[in-house]
Amino acid sequence: MGEKMHVDEMEIDEALVRRLLVDKRITGVIDWATMGVGDPACDVMVAWKLHSPAARDAFREYLPTDDATWARARGWVVSQAVGVLAYYTPENNPVLYQEARSWLDLVLSE
């Protein structure tokens, strides 16, 4: 793989960037799915998927996290839930659909 370019918490593979621009024209779209690699918020976002505020509070107390990381983790859960709900339905994957709905409900309830 090519060298990594770091932009704040985001990593972009330079080899990928070369495939996106050809003759100074955009030839593709960046898949942002791995954008958070290296972001500690990705490690703590599981706390936002816990089904009780008490469990979430215990998680945060055990693994101290600053407010910005905690907020990004919450955002990652929203992003994942919306992505799942945009693709899956109660008909084609009822389990994952319901799980994503529950994540979104949990995040939006606070």
Image: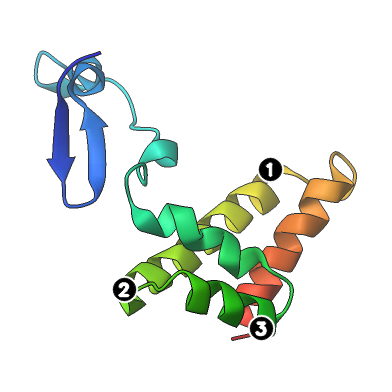
Q: Residue at image x 15%, y 21%?
A: 3
Give x and y (percent) for residue 70.
Answer: 41, 72
The kind of residue on which mark 3 rests is Pro
42 relative to 59, above or below: above
Residue 53 badge: 3
Which of the 4 quarters of the picture holds residue 48? Answer: bottom right
Give x and y (percent) for residue 20.
Answer: 24, 21
Give x and y (percent) for residue 33.
Answer: 44, 39
Say which of 29 and 56 sits in front: 56
Quadrant location of the C terminus in the rendered image: bottom right
Q: Is residue 56 left or right of residue 65?
A: right
Q: Are marks 3 and 2 in contact (CB under 8 Å)?
A: no
Element under disc 2:
helix
Q: CA distance from mark 1 to mark 2?
A: 29 Å
Residue located beneath label 1 in the image: 87
Say which of 88 and 105 sits in front: 105
Q: CA distance from mark 3 to mark 2?
A: 19 Å
Q: Is residue 23 left or right of residue 32?
A: left
48 relative to 97, above or below: below
Q: CA distance from mark 1 to mark 3?
A: 28 Å
Residue located beneath label 2 in the image: 68
Q: Residues within 10 Å of mark 1 (few under 14, many from 20)?
A: few
The kind of residue on which mark 1 rests is Tyr
